[in-house]
Amino acid sequence: MLALLRRDKFALAAAVFLVVVVLAALVGPPLLGGIGIDMDLMARNAPPFEPDRGFWHILGSDALGRPILARIIIAARPTLLIAAAAVLLSMVVGVLLGLIAGYKGGIVGDVIMRLTDIVMSFPSLLLALVVLYIFGPAITNVIIVLAITRVPVYLRTTRAEVLEIRSRMFVVAAEVTGASVFRTVSRHILPMVVPTIATLMTIEFAFVMLAEASLSFLGLGVQAPDFTWGVMVAEGRSYLATAWWLSFWPGVFIALVTMSLNLLSNWLRIATDPVQRWRLEREVASDE
């Protein structure tokens, strides 16, 4: 897979950037200490690229004189954790229900699909806004709401895959030889669904990040003292005319991570598809 990844320069650059962001989110906050939290009123709304103020102020300072670069690194952890938790939760629930609806079918499958249709009948962002307005904008509530709105995507995708796979010969052979439902699904059907789900998770991670940023921008996402990139964008909207960098730089990082995830998902779709993967393998073989 690494050899295939090296063949796609854009996907490789996206993967390297994402690894750097994840490492910064993991090790950055403990190493920074209070750099991104301590106020310096002498540096209020200091513009970017002023070397006299030091390295951490290279992207400018916010309304309380805190360096934007340090705050972006600190905010990377909650931003990625919220997106990862929501994606994993929605994936587990959606894939499980999709396997049941696709393999079991019948009344159970119909009930699951009708409930899915009800959830999908509401715009996901509008549903999240209503729920967070009622229950309050806590981090846990944000994760649960974002997960619920994305469950139908995994459910419908998994069900469609299962309906196509269950009629294949190797699945029929497993059923004829007396394999249990659990063994048939876990050993023969689920591995065939995993590549599609992995690609979908990459795309959904980007979507959930944007959704969390939208909720935070509207004031119903993460609340102080916690902050994410979306919160930083929201905090800077009052200064767009005088200090554009407060919202610009966290918005740039949201866009870069989202674009990198989309590039990586496109490569992953090709690399896991036997119909298209041979092209990448041929290019690798020709280089060798």
Image: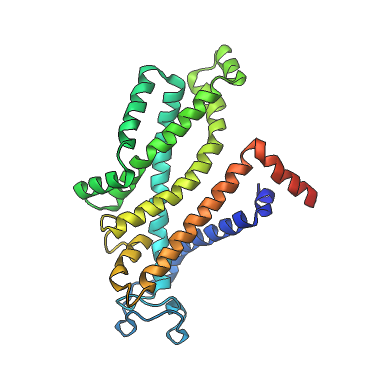
Q: On the picture, is 285 further left or further right than 199?
A: right
Q: Position of residue 66 (x, y in %)?
A: 35, 76
Instruction: Count the labels in the image.
Output: 0
Is residue 213 depicted above or below 151 in this figure? below
Q: Residue at x 53, y 37 (%)?
A: 196
Q: Could you say which quadrant of the image residue 165 lies in?
A: top right
Q: How is the image coloured?
A: rainbow
Please identify the residue farthest to the bottom as the structure is shown.
Answer: 52
Q: Residue at x 45, y 84 (%)?
A: 50
Q: Position of residue 244 (x, y in %)?
A: 37, 73
Q: Residue at x 51, y 29 (%)?
A: 161
Q: Could you say which quadrant of the image residue 11 lies in?
A: bottom right
Q: Is residue 144 visible?
A: no
Q: Position of residue 126 (x, y in %)?
A: 28, 46
Q: Position of residue 76 (x, y in %)?
A: 42, 61
Please identify the residue farthest to the left as the structure is shown.
Answer: 134
Q: On the picture, is 4 further left or further right than 225?
A: right
Q: Could you say which quadrant of the image residue 268 lies in?
A: top right
Please identify the residue farthest to the front as the structure is shown.
Answer: 241
Is residue 260 depicted above or below 30 in this figure? above
